[in-house]
Image (tube, rainbow, N blue to C red):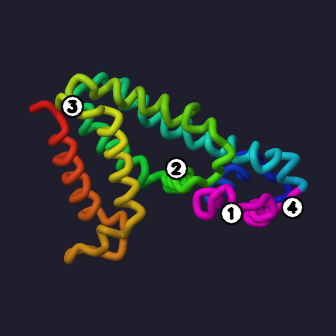
Amino acid sequence: MGDVITHRQITDVAARLFGELGYDGTSLHMIAEAAGTDASTLSEVAGDKRRLYLDVMRQAYAVEQAMLESLAERGFRGRTAVHQMVDGYLDFYLAHRENRTLWLQRWLSDAADITELEDLYLCPMLRVAVDMITDSVRPGVDPYYVIGSLIWSILGYLGSGTAKCRPDATDRLEDPKAVESFRAHLHTTMDGLLVQ
């Protein structure tokens, strides 16, 4: 990466490693080696491992929050908002593997001693999404679970390899035909949770 390494270069490498190996399974030495520098330079530029992890998660949040805010700014509510969220989240997680894997690691109790991230990042995003759909969910259906189910479904699809088991599957998870089939499935599934 050259003689001078930037904070952004370090956080990009760290995001990949934290997503693949988890916070607990990644050392500063591993990050430094992958970034092409030494641990002391890495620490000077990015701080200790906890500080670096917090920076990575803040960066991941900012990108995801921007996607969600762009959906909210469109002003859609109800069924249209749900369909926009299906498309927005699916396209986002296809394009941002690190965001996907970082949250999956957290759900596996990675970095369990860093407890504030859900309150700082996940809960505010969920509140924005829930506000967009609350008026259109069926009675007795919790809008937080609707959004949760959407995200869990997407992350499960992208991480499980289920699409590869279909008779018409290719070896590529991002195969347009498979993605569009899953997108249609999500639209139908979410419609079942909404007032007709």
Residue 21 part of the magenta-drawn span: yes
Q: Depth-wise, is mark 2 or mark 4 nearer the camera?
A: 2
Q: Is residue 119 left or right of residue 1?
A: left
Q: Which residues are magenta?
A: 17-39
Q: Residues within 10 Å of mark 1 (few under 14, many from 20)?
A: few
Q: Is residue 1 left or right of residue 189?
A: right
> Label 2 belongs to which residue?
103
Q: Could you give the CA–CA distance between mark 3 and mark 4, rounded to whole angstroms?
A: 55 Å
Residue drawn at x 48%, y 53% is: 100
Chain-order first, disc 3 or disc 1: 1
Q: Position of residue 10 (x, y in %)?
A: 73, 52
> Label 4 belongs to which residue?
38
Position of 141 relative to 188 (above/below) = above
Local secondary structure at mark 1: loop
Local secondary structure at mark 2: helix
**Image quadrant for the N terminus?**
bottom right
Position of 45 relative to 81 (above/below) = below
